Amino acid sequence: MLERFLSELMSNLSEAISSLPSLATEYIGNKRGLLDFVARTIVDESGSGTQEILDLFSGTGVVSAAFKTLGYAVTANDHLSTCFNLTSAVLLNHAEPRFEGISASLPGKVSAMGPYNAVLDYLNNLPETPGGFAHRNFSPASAVEIETERRYFTETNAQKIDVVRDQIESWRPVLTDAEHALLISDLVRAVSAVSNVAGTFGCYLKQWKIRALSPMVLRPSGFVDGRRSGHAVLSMEAHEAVPKAKARIIYADPPYTKRQYAAYYHVLETIVRNDKPVLIGSTGLRNWETHASDFCYKRRAIGALDSLLSVMECEHFFLSYNEDGQMEHDQILDVLGGYGRVGFREMSLRRYKSSALPHKGPNVAERIYHLAVS
């Protein structure tokens, strides 16, 4: 009976999540391909009770979207502004918003296209203007100031990024939180689609990729319906979010590797924040150390996990982790075991990039640990 119920849930979930657009650039640790495994495990192991969950490291928001679809009240958290906006767009929008604060200024387009498409059409047709922050710092125009051509975007696309971001900022007072997050999310996806990078924004490529030469276009998002109330999105450190949310279920998907998200996605973070920071080096890196995660350091990761557990207020704690991560399997079991009854499920995945080292095979174990808090 339970298996049939879970199968029906997962079928509905798969259909709903397929409507969500993905980023053109790789987001490290994205769980889109593991949603069935993650959701099935959590629903199965957590049993009956209040349907409320804290998605502690929300990333692009796909797990939050899954549990919204399943009828849970979701509190999502991520300390990166990019992730906060991506997840807010997913949780706070259930269908196309009305953009009532803007529609009056676009009467002809709204009646012909609908408010959402009219707003995107307006943004897509803004004239490019040189001299903005992205143009000066993330395109070949950077050579004027630093004698280095940062080729994250063509000059035309960088100019488009500037005018669109500035327009969204000028609209902020008349946008709802849901509408603002949606437009920022649409911009992030458009930026990703024309970025001249190899997977992440750690560095730009010296030669132009074909996609980077295409003009940037904001395209409408799909929407995930489900529970329409009780959701919240936070942007703080995980150990601060845990006591604040106080959900019955906590799902944690921390970084596995030494790659710091704040550094690897610094360009997106700068565009989303629109704070025009001081940039350093040939890659134009912002100061990311304030958002460094202890989970990315082998000597600190297990302590970071223990710190989270020490402040949690929940009945069930789930941890997604990969056997190639900074914490060892036995370490995780030992720390979790200090707080209650522990079990885990695992599945085998093909390694993203197989190591040349002889002990690294073609597959890797992805695990979900379950702590029933005592």
Image: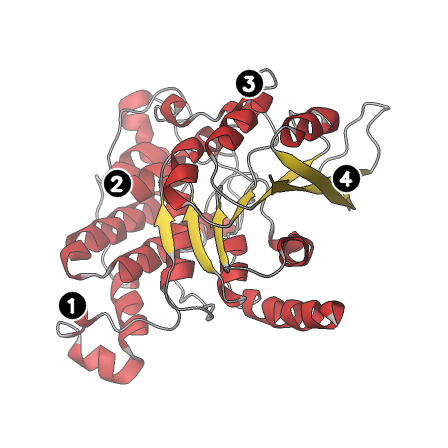
Query: Earlier along the polypeptide chain: callout 1 or callout 2?
Result: 1
Q: Residue at x 42, y 45 (%)?
A: 246
Measured Cα–Cα span from mark 1 to mark 4:
49 Å
Neighbour tally class for label 1: few under 14, some 14-19, many 20 plus, Cα within 10 Å: few
Q: Quadrant of residue 36?
A: bottom right
The residue nearer to you, when weighing 267 against 216, is: 267
x and y percent of residue 93 in the render?
37, 65
Which numbered disc covers residue 300? 3
Measured Cα–Cα span from mark 3 to mark 1:
47 Å
User: In this figure, which residue is indicated by the disc labeled 4?
Assistant: 365
x and y percent of residue 163 in the render?
23, 51
Q: Residue at x 26, y 49 (%)?
A: 165
Residue extending furthest front? 374
Q: What type is the residue that disc 3 sits on?
A: Arg
Q: Are marks 3 and 2 in contact (CB under 8 Å)?
A: no
Mark closer to the observer (1, 4) = 4
Q: Quadrant of residue 237?
A: top left
- Asked which secondary structure carries label 2, the reply is loop
Q: What type is the residue that disc 4 sits on?
A: Ala
Measured Cα–Cα span from mark 4 to mark 2:
39 Å
Query: Earlier along the polypeptide chain: callout 3 or callout 1?
Result: 1
User: In this figure, which residue is indicated by the disc labeled 1?
Assistant: 101
User: In this figure, which residue is indicated by the disc labeled 2?
Assistant: 274
